[in-house]
Amino acid sequence: MLPAHLKGRDFLRVNDWAPEELVLVLDHADRLKARQRERVPHLLLEGRTLGMIFQKPSTRTRVSFEVGIAQLGGTGLYLAAGDLQLGRGETIKDTAIVLSRYLDGIMIRTFEQADVDELAAHADVPVINGLTDEFHPCQALADVLTIRERLGGFEGSRVAYLGDGNNVCHSLMVACAKLGMDFVAATPSGYEPSKEVVGWARAAAEAEGTTVELTTDPREAATGADVLYTDVWTSMGQEEEREQRLADLAGYGIDEDLVSLASERAIVLHCLPAHYGEEITEDVLYGPRSAVWDQAENRLHAQKALMAFVIR
Ligand code: CP
Ligand code: NVA
């Protein structure tokens, strides 16, 4: 039985969901992953359509949502934001109302979180955040699914995020805190995660009896960590800052030396796409500690579970 109380719910940020709700999604993702492996049909959303609005490029998010809804018996509709009337000034409100008459769910990848919030406020169907400048909650679901799969649970685990305190860092931080893991972010000064999000994560960590720390020292963060996590230094929309970012973030990349400081069971995660020799070396990405390819696959399973729960 799927939890009826989640039907119709938006997934806009990790912080909006309770720890036990996140665990329900992860448990269902494990089940759906096993069924998919065995090619056991699981047509939980037969006849439903997910609209997928993209205002930024994507490989994983697009393909995992489109394949995911198809495996659930539904249809995914790719909607390039620039091809919609939205790109010619139709309001988000009107777009939300009209799309709700056709679709059973909307996934959106865009710049401003406020635009996703507005879409959700006016849509009658669940809205899923497929990445904004501030958050990447679907990525965080796959991240914690992978951590649980590889480490066998969350308790007693310490996650170290290294690099830019960005959208991926924000969602991961809150997810780790809610699920009872210690979290540390090592960023250069000026690249710290937002104070507001750190506040949410610390509130969740307090309830779980864990910690959320910030440091500027990547070696200190990596020492004894069970998960080393990084993301690109130049996010989509920041291309003009690339040279400055390369200079400022140098020294925060994950290489073999940093991995040697982590715990014996440590895994390395990266949401991808990767830039070899910047935030991660090719050796580490393809090395024995890397769980990056499972993590990318888990986008599919986690989002299928999420869609099965929220789409009516
Ligand atoms: N990790 C991730 O969201 O990848 P895409 O940008 O390829 O969707
Ligand atoms: N922080 C990156 C994540 C890409 C999946 C970006 O926003 O471009």
Image (tube, rainbow, N blue to C red):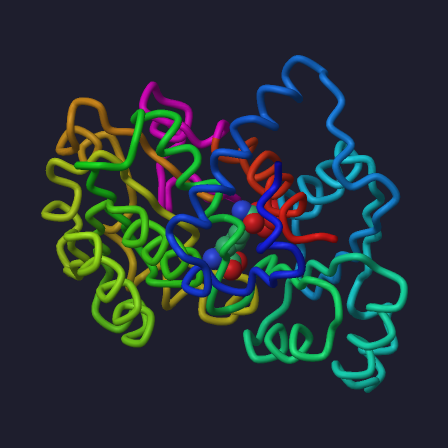
Q: Position of residue 301 (x, y in %)?
A: 59, 34
Q: Is residue 128 above or below residue 262?
A: below
Quarter occupied by residue 12: bottom right
Q: Residue furthest top?
A: 38
Residue 237 in magenta stretch? no
Q: Is residue 289 above or below residue 252?
A: above
Q: Is residue 118 above or below residue 290?
A: below
The residue drawn where x is 34% and y is 29% is 284
Q: Position of residue 38 (x, y in %)?
A: 66, 13
Q: Is residue 240 left or right of residue 9?
A: left
How many dots with numbers?
0
The residue drawn where x is 81% and y is 54% is 78
Image: magenta residue range: 272-294
Q: Is residue 61 left or right of residue 176?
A: right
Q: Position of residue 299 (x, y in %)?
A: 56, 39
Predominant secondary structure, magenta span: loop
Q: Is residue 262 left or right of residue 131?
A: left
Q: Position of residue 203 (x, y in %)?
A: 24, 66
Residue 285 in magenta stretch? yes
Q: Is residue 230 left or right of residue 137?
A: left
The residue drawn where x is 43% and y is 52% is 232
The residue drawn where x is 36% and y is 32% is 148
Quarter occupied by residue 225: top left
Quarter occupied by residue 173: bottom left
Front residue (pair 52, 255):
52
In the rendered image, the quadrant that contains the N terminus is top right
Front residue (pair 111, 116):
116
